[in-house]
Image (cartoon, coloured by chain):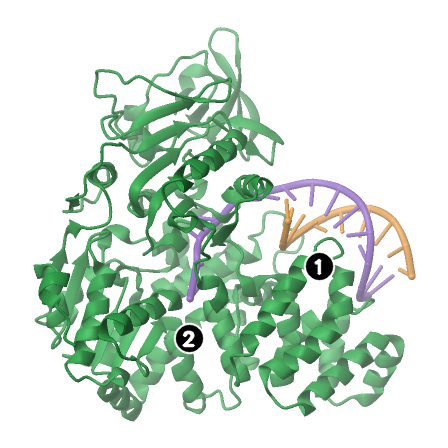
Chain colours: A green, B purple, C orange
Amino acid sequence: MSIDFENELNEAQREAVQTTEGPVLVIAGAGSGKTRTIVYRLAHLVESGVDPSQILLLTFTRKAAQEMLNRAEMILGRSLHGTSGGTFHSFAYATLRQNAMDIGFDNGFTLMDRADSENICKDVKDSLKLGKGDRSYPRKSTLLDMITKSRNKELPIETILEREAYHLNSYLDDLNEISDGYAHFKRNHALMDYDDLLFLVDKLLTENKPLRNQLQTRYRYIMVDEYQDTNLVQARIVKLLAGDKGNVMAVGDDAQSIYAFRGANVANILKFPQIFKDAKVIRLEKNYRSVQPILDLTNEILKGATIKFDKKLYSDLKSNHLPEVVHPLSDQSQAKLVVDQILEFRRKFSLHDIAVLFRAGYQSFPLEVALTRIGIDYQKYGGIRFHEAAHIKDVLSYLRLVLNPHDLLAWQRALDHIKGVGPKTVAKIYKAIHARDNKYLGKMTQKHEQLGELLGELNKLRATPPKPSAILESILAFYQPILTEKYPDDYPKRQAGLEQLSQIAVNYSDMEQFLGDLSLDGDPEEEKRKENAVVLSTVHSAKGLEWSAVIIIDLVEDRFPSRKAMQRAEDLEEERRLMYVACTRAKKCLKLFVPSSVYNRASGMSEPTLPSPFILELPDTVFDRMNESYGGGLEQRRKRGTTGATPLSRPKTNESETSTTPKTDPSKLGFCRHKIFGKGKIIARIEPNKCRVNFPGFGLKVIIEDYLELI
DNA sequence: GAAAAATTCGTTTTT
DNA sequence: CGAATTTTTC
């Protein structure tokens, strides 16, 4: 059977599929058949006689790689077994494990997750006696943020602080010290974080020429998806694997770059033709996903970008309906209206073809409650990951101790469950175990009988065959009483998670592979789309996916765009691209929800909101507007004859502030900006021309109105 | 002195 | 709702 490339692909796609020799860069607009192109190229390669094991497919998630391989197998009618597919990180993990000796990890290594890394930062900070009693000292997550940002962007911490965290400048020396301490700790305990995987593979391939040659020969064809979201070290790895004029195809869209925050560098995709000489550049511009009215709206979003994209999506798909902007009165009623909307969509689409997207994981909570109440099943992507849940980590810590008795983090976790044992005692026990100080250990096991039980269990486990499922079974029995003790309110739910974990374990025979996959890819079962469940997802996790109907919620200032992104122009631009990615996920229907008030945990009450700038700037020709009436229903708002488009206030730098002030009704409350105190909320109007304003960090102030800029 | 309990604080995005 | 800090208990 031969594949009908003529009819299945358009001209540009066909060219990308059939240019198999030499470097190729595919700039693919949203919905332009990017995945289709990769899938057909895989099929084409294998059909023309390439051994699947000579293909390397690097994608953003393992799920994406798996899906592409499956689809290629379908159209090809044969197995693609042997193809290497996955994320950069999983590829790196596998490569490093096979060559652990070479990089100085003779006894293997343990891959840490984010929480582990943060805890090390904290331990290092404490042991250096830094920040004692300083309430405003950066949180451990902030410390790690700066450290990994510096590594991923390959810039000194000082530069990172200057550019994007000016307020942390006074902690520069501390940060450098902690960063060094963190690196030492990792090396001393054979630990790696996500960044190490990439940097060590880069080092390994650079220094080990035979291995490099071997891999270059093996991977004759390399494809990299989402190239706009790769960072510098990832680009180097591609170059090392491909050689000077390898057959490498990079696919991406500069307008969809949304990972700059973790070091992704758009320059990679823009400079690809210079790095790989004579690269053929192919542009896919026709959109096959969305109806034209949706594209009209997304084109408007790109139009507002400071750095212009020469992109305008067009489609043959027609629709009589415009996207809708819905204004609920509060986030609570937003949840209710979204549920109503889902019920309405369900008459036309199946539930798994409907998605609700949001900026941050917590924003779906009210909706999750509403969905549960009405009995609609949902599947959530983003937010807390399966393997990061406390009970899963508890269980895995025992597993890790079986593998590596030097794993201090695992000891800390495991010993923490013993009553009367805290951090200090853990340190002593850890030391005693490695000094074989049986006297001290004997004393402690007398004092804490649970310690004896734990050590006995570990010995028992080391004696059982090293099959993940067998060991896990024993651990679960041991952990059971701890689970019910530690989580009296919700242990049934957590227990279900643990059972899921043992289900996953059944598929593994190798312990380290099991642990690695778990931290790198999460739960493989979870990845499958549930048949009868509506999808809830962060925009980041929605990348590369599509649904017939898409609802985006919380489109208000401080939520989308995120509050943290309002300070710097670059961040705001990334939020815009994020908005673009979110809207371009929709095939037929797009609904944008802008609640007029949201609950604020800090003040404990509902507070008025400002619509997201990305909504305000849209000309009202590209959408219909619906308001929630006080009776609870929706009513369409009449359009004005005028253009209605308010020019978006530019990134709020000092210079541009004065020029874009829309003079609002002075009797209204809202947000304002002050030269010294920054952004604040107007609590009350006092007398003729003064306001009481609450400035975060400064508290309540009374200010003469003339010194305030209304925003 | 160290661990457990109570309280206060502030919330992006991910491999 | 989870984590850091303060207070209470052992």
Badge 2 and badge 1 both on one subunit: yes
Which amino acid, mark 1? Tyr
| Residue at screen point 14% across, 47% down | A310
- The tag earlier along the polypeptide, 2 or 1, is 2
Chain for numbered disc 2: A
Q: Position of residue A684 (x, y in %)?
A: 54, 16
Q: Quadrant of residue A583?
A: top left
Which amino acid, mark 2? Leu
**Position above or below: A417 against A693:** below
| Residue at screen point 34% across, 17% down | A663
Closer-to-camera residue (A172/A437): A437
Q: Position of residue A429 (x, y in %)?
A: 76, 79
**Position above or below: A106 against A530:** below
Q: Nearer the viewer, mark 2 or mark 1?
A: 1
Residue A611 in sight in this render: yes
**Position above or below: A272 against A373:** below
Alpha-carbon span between mark 2 and mark 1: 34 Å
Q: Which residue is mark 2?
A: A197
Q: Which mark is residue A491?
A: 1
Closer-to-camera residue (A468/A168): A468
Mark 1 residue element: helix
